[in-house]
Amino acid sequence: MAAARRGEQLDLPSFLGSGGAAVPPLLYADDMVLLATSAAGLQRQLNLLQQYCRQWGLTVNIDKTKLLLLSGRRTQHAAQQTAEAAGLTFAGQQLAAVTSFKYLSIAFHSSTCLAGAAAPARAQLARLAMHNCRTRCAEVGIEAAPVQLRLFGTMVDSVLSHGAEVWGVQLAAKAACCHRGSAGSAAEKLQLSYLRHLLGVRQSTPNAALLAETGERPLWQRWLRRAAKLWNKTLEERPGSLLQQALLSSVQLADGAHPLAQQSWAAQLAADLAAVGMQLDLQQPAPVDLGELGEAAQRRQLAQLQEALAKGGASRLEHYVHNVVGALNLAPAMFGQRETYLDAVRRRQDREALAQLRTGSHWGAEETGRWTRRPREQRVCPHCHDGIEDAPHMLLTCPLYAPLRLNFPDLFAEPHPPHRFLRQKPCRLAAFAAACHQRWLTATVALPAVPP
């Protein structure tokens, strides 16, 4: 920066709306990023760095030093060619041009938006962390669901969401607007995969049911909260600080005419908040109320569930709403608090059997008939031939399980609709569900083969 103040032409990028203030080189420990708007300006910066290193006896690892074009080309091939044509050198050695690079563990790409580059890279690292987490749980015999959920937050999400307050805002806006409650990013899929494995349910289990059962917030809500905290922190910075200049530029660059992926960070955050029913005035910046944000996000999560129901064809979700939650009990408060059986039931086999019945991802013909695309009305119980073999049928009416019901008289002391039946003592419910599954397995082996 001293050289720039002396008048040397370094072609540093400048903050918009800050009187032409230059963006300085980025320094963190021994990592450095030099930024320039021209190849000639960047070469002059490299020459100054070489002089400084020679003066103080420092060395630069040329093998790890890369040249990346961040904008100006639509394809990575064109970006690669442009960067190579610049022919930039350090200490007489030509720098290798690349199309992607990680700085402080965040991936940047020459022709992809920040979210498109960062999220898959974080998911790839987090997938390894998730496998390590599962392996460690198996080694020490950890089956308790609350412990596994805490370990996900500590070992997996800390890797998965690193830097998400910056790169996650675009994905959060997309997910908040989607009726499925997920933007379909690799990072979000990883979280949902972990929850399915924890509950022992299939890939087709509705996202809304997974999140409601476990009490976990979807990643988009976590990312949005982190982004809002960064916004609030930036507003508290001293006027003229580097962070405030960056925010002011981001506000100045906001332009609703462009697609979300091409919007500035501030514009994407405003879109996130608008998706959950909150407004962010970029012309008069004010702190975001985090408590209000949490409530608004839960309301949006409930609205997404209702939108998915209204589209039709979501029979598993309909089962979860009507037979597990109870249609009259739908409320934002149903999210964010895990179901009691996950805390109370330690035996994995029992917990999984109950989770499968609750989520509709069970062993009955209603579910297995989907695999052969059999019409729902033909998925009749093969044991009693009296109705579709769904969760309420197996739990409450099928004679196959009548002897088991005698062993659990406390659960059947009085008639209950399914959603009230499933609100009884979780340990007893889980033991009954596991016994039903075992009884079904034994009876199914003895059944004659039935043509599809």
Image (tube, rainbow, N blue to C red):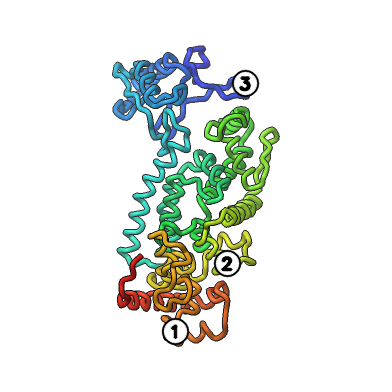
Which one is in front, 144 or 300? Answer: 300
- The image quadrant of residue 400 is bottom left
Left or right of 181 on screen, residue 40: left
Residue at 36% across, 57% down? 133
| Residue at the spot of label 1 | 402
Q: Nearer the viewer, mark 2 or mark 3?
A: 2
Residue 378 on image: x %, y %: 44, 67
Residue at 38% across, 20% down? 83
| Marks 1 and 3 in Cβ contact (< 8 Å) | no
Local SS, label 3: loop
At label 2, the amino acid type is His
Residue at 43% across, 28% down? 111
Indicate whether 167 appears above or below 417.
above
| Marks 2 and 3 in Cβ contact (< 8 Å) | no
Q: Distance between the residues labelled 2 and 1?
A: 24 Å
At label 3, the amino acid type is Gly
* First along the sequence among labels 2 and 3: 3
Residue 19's disc number: 3
Residue 421 on image: x %, y %: 54, 76
Local SS, label 1: helix
Which one is in front, 432 or 42? Answer: 432
Residue 202 on image: x %, y %: 41, 60
| Residue at the spot of label 2 | 322
Which one is in front, 163 or 401? Answer: 401
Circle 3 Cα neighbour tier, 10 Å, few/some/many (<14 / 14–19 / ≥20): few
* First along the sequence among labels 1 and 3: 3
How many numbered tags mark residues here?
A: 3
Circle 1 Cα neighbour tier, 10 Å, few/some/many (<14 / 14–19 / ≥20): some
Q: Distance between the residues labelled 2 and 3?
A: 59 Å
